[in-house]
Image (spheres, grey):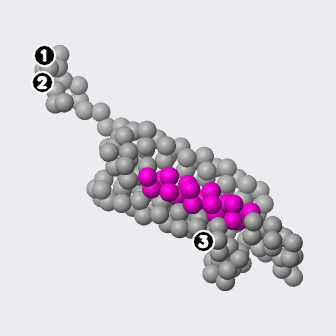
């Protein structure tokens, strides 16, 4: 089993990856790189055959830009949570990460499944695992309660 510092670093790297992905999605969503990585997987679900109409491509560029900015902010927030309060083993930071990734996954994956965007369902599942696995391995550092001392030794507890 890996150490707390390993899993904290893992979460920090994943958070930075999320932020970078958001940045790329915001500003380069219609680039050849994003066409290869993302658009060629998603576009055929909604525009089979001839390709995406020009007006739809403009809307897609805008909505991906807004989504990318949101993902960028989410990744930065996660990085700060991991680097400061999570690293200090503050329980609320663990809870924040666990709840936010769970709510995001359920909402995003439900919507993606409804629209048959299988690629996004797979992408979401991989991202969920990248965050949940370290959360599971670090949970004991946030929820472990030391054994209760007998009343006679209560004053001798470490501060």
Is label 2 or label 3 in front?
3
Residue 10 appearing in the image: yes
Query: In the picture shown, does residue 47 fall above or below 128?
Result: below
How many labels, in total? 3
SS at badge 1: helix
The image's mark for residue 152 is: 1
Q: Earlier in the sequence, mark 1 or mark 3?
A: 3
Q: Are marks 1 and 2 in contact (CB under 8 Å)?
A: no
In the picture, which quadrant includes the C terminus?
top left
Residue occupied by mark 2: 156
Q: Residue furthest top?
A: 151
Most common secondary structure along the magenta stretch: helix
Q: Secondary structure at mark 2?
A: helix
Q: Is residue 36 visible?
A: no
Q: Is residue 75 left or right of residue 86?
A: right
Q: CA distance from mark 2 to mark 3?
A: 54 Å
Position of 12 relative to 44 (above/below): above
Residue stretch in magenta: 63-80
Residue 24 numbered tag: 3
Q: Give me the residue at 12% from left, 24% from top.
A: 156
Reply yes or no: does residue 76 show up in magenta: yes
Q: Hey, which quadrant is residue 50 in on the image?
A: bottom right
Q: Position of residue 155 (x, y in %)?
A: 14, 20
* Disc 1 packing (10 Å; few <14; some 14–19; many ≥20): few
Q: Are marks 2 and 3 in contact (CB under 8 Å)?
A: no
């Amino acid at each position: 089993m890996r150490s707390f510092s390993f899993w904290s670093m893992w979460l920090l790297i994943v958070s930075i990856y999320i932020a970078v992905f958001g940045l790329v999605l915001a500003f380069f969503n219609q680039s050849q790189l994003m066409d290869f990585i993302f658009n060629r997987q998603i576009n055929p679900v909604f525009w089979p055959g001839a390709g995406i109409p020009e007006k739809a491509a403009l809307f897609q560029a805008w909505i991906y830009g807004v989504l990318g900015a949101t993902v960028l902010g989410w990744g930065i927030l996660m990085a700060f949570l991991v680097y400061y309060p999570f690293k200090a083993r503050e329980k609320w930071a663990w809870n924040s990460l666990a709840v936010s990734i769970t709510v995001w996954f359920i909402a995003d994956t439900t919507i993606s499944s409804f629209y048959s965007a299988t690629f996004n369902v797979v992408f979401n599942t991989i991202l969920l695992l990248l965050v949940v696995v370290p959360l599971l391995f670090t949970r004991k550092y946030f929820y472990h309660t030391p054994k209760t001392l007998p009343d006679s030794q209560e004053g001798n507890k470490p501060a």
